[in-house]
Image (spheres, rainbow, N blue to C red):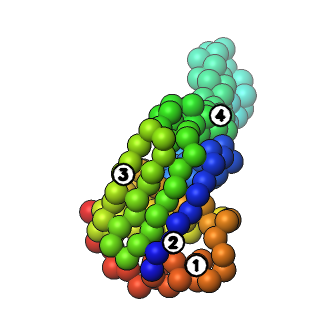
Amino acid sequence: MHIIVDTQPDPALWRAAFRQVLRKSMRRVRILGAILAALGVLLVLLAVATDGDDAAPLILGIFLVVLGALYALYLPVRALQLSLRRMPPALQQPQRLELTEQYVEVTSPLIFTRYAWGAFVRIQEAPGLLMLMLSRNQTLPVPLGGLPPEDLARLRNFVANRQFVLR
């Protein structure tokens, strides 16, 4: 197998890759936000139902609802934006990815990197993208859009037959 993929910097591709990589950790953040918001709603309801003079439970409940909404809605979007903004300039260049049976090679005007297939802990496919996972939160995205169908079939067959050791 010898497949060459030439890519141009594509913010939509990187956004999809980061979203896929951050999905599990952002799910936890969203769940925490939902729990905080639910606790806040419960405190607000208790404060209104008791009709007491103490405003502390009401204020705390409103604070928890707002904090939960931030965790559930704002933080995942902001984390994705920051990840994209902090991407190194070397990855924002046109790249050539060469995939063989022994290695994956990435070449651009600023970098040259070669990974043995054993460096990847798993591979997952996203729409139009093959995610070569170096760790739980680090990926090498390979765009599949420009590949001829026969190369895509060979690549999928090769990847399906790989054994990955999860570290």
Spot occupied by residue 26 in the image (x, y as percentages of width and height): 54, 47
Mark 3 or 1, nearer chain start? 3
Tell me the distance, in whole angstroms, between the alpha carbons under discs 2 and 3: 16 Å
Mark 3 is surrounded, within 10 Å at the Cα level, by few (under 14), some (14 to 19) or many (20 or more) other residues, namely few
Residue ID at (61%, 34%): 81
In the image shown, does 35 or 163 lie closer to the viewer?
163
Q: Position of residue 103 (x, y in %)?
A: 35, 67
The CA span between labels 3 and 4 is 35 Å
Compute the Cα span from label 3 to label 1: 22 Å
**Residue 167 image point, x, y percent:** 27, 63
Residue displayed at 60% across by 54% down: 7
Q: Earlier in the sequence, mark 4 or mark 1?
A: 4
Image quarter hosting the N terminus: bottom left
| Residue that carries the numbered disc 1 in the rendered image | 151
Question: Which mark sits nearer the N-terminus, 2 or 3?
Answer: 2
Q: Going 41% across and 43% down the picture, which residue do you hit?
A: 111
> What's under tag 2, amino acid-wise?
Ile
Density class for disc 2 (Cα within 10 Å; few <14, some 14-19, many ≥20) is some
SS category of the residue bearing label 3: strand
**10 or 165, which is in the foreground?**
10
At x 46% / y 64%, what residue is drawn? 98
- Per the model, the C-alpha gap separating discs 2 and 4 is 40 Å
| Residue beneath disc 2 | 3
**Residue indicated by mark 4:** 74
Disc 4 marks a residue whose amino acid type is Tyr
- Which one is earlier in the sequence, the residue at label 3 or at label 4? 4
How far, Cα to Cα, is label 4 from label 1? 40 Å
